[in-house]
Amino acid sequence: DVKVTQSSRYLVKRTGEKVFLECVQDMDHENMFWYRQDPGLGLRLIYFSYDVKMKEKGDIPEGYSVSREKKERFSLILESASTNQTSMYLCASSPSTEGNTEAFFGQGTRLTVV
Amino acid sequence: DQQVKQNSPSLSVQEGRISILNCDYTNSMFDYFLWYKKYPAEGPTFLISISSIKDKNEDGRFTVFLNKSAKHLSLHIVPSQPGDSAVYFCAATSTTSGTYKYIFGTGTRLKVLA
């Protein structure tokens, strides 16, 4: 079974703090993604990576950065947390194959910025 | 610009009846479509998918229909069960773009009444 593990289920951080959200997958997937989920807005793509040290901006990258130093690990960084970054953050991974395949999600991190 | 749209934020259905969830997309490069189910405080789980070379895919109680000319897909759940109560997201991707990026809709909250 594919396992995508996010380091924290719940986090509370102060405005201006630097925040690290960690994600690890155990299926040797090439692609990894960070989404945030907000009521009425669905899942919005922040950043994704299709290889080690490679990254691409998604639809809402402002205020975020990412790091992928190893294939299994994809980190989301909030450089200076703000209250509008309070959200559910979801990490996902998928293989790069010729065939069609789905993305597998972690359990999510509920981040509150106060 | 929302490339994947779910215009019904919520749906209530009696147990045993059919649930029909709808999804529209605008990008004609999308050729693979997925449905995910999400419970509160958990990550989305994959439900069913369909390739653009098909117009129907069935898996037990779940059937997805694709109308490419209308850029519309729907998920049918028959019979609906109380355990199906969750938020359902449709997603789309282009398998020919090389990036395997998944774009999600805003979600439909399904409530199945016992």
Image: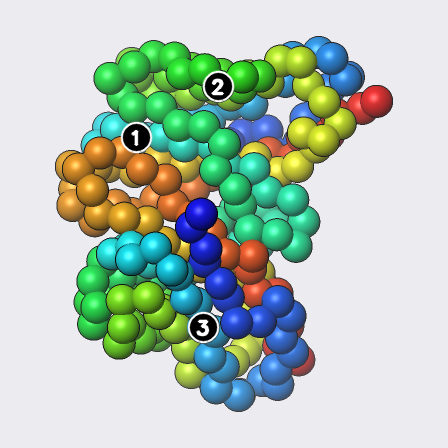
Name the residue beneath numbered marker 3.
A22
Q: Chain of mark 1?
A: B
Residue B75 visible here? yes
Q: Quadrant of the C terminus of chain A?
A: bottom right
Q: Secondary structure at mark 2?
A: strand
Question: Is B19 drawn above or below residue A10 in the view shown?
Answer: above
Name the residue beneath numbered marker 2.
B59
**Label 2 is placed on what type of residue?**
Asp
Residue A83 vs residue B51, the one in the foreground? B51
The answer to whether B40 appears left or right of A109 in the picture is right
Cα distance in 3D space between marks 1 and 3:
28 Å
Tell me the residue at 33%/66% (across/down): A72
**Label 3 is placed on what type of residue?**
Glu
Q: Chain of mark 3?
A: A
Tell me the residue at 75%/27% (across/down): B82
The answer to whether A26 appears left or right of B93 in the picture is right
Q: Quadrant of residue B64?
A: top left
Q: Secondary structure at mark 1?
A: strand
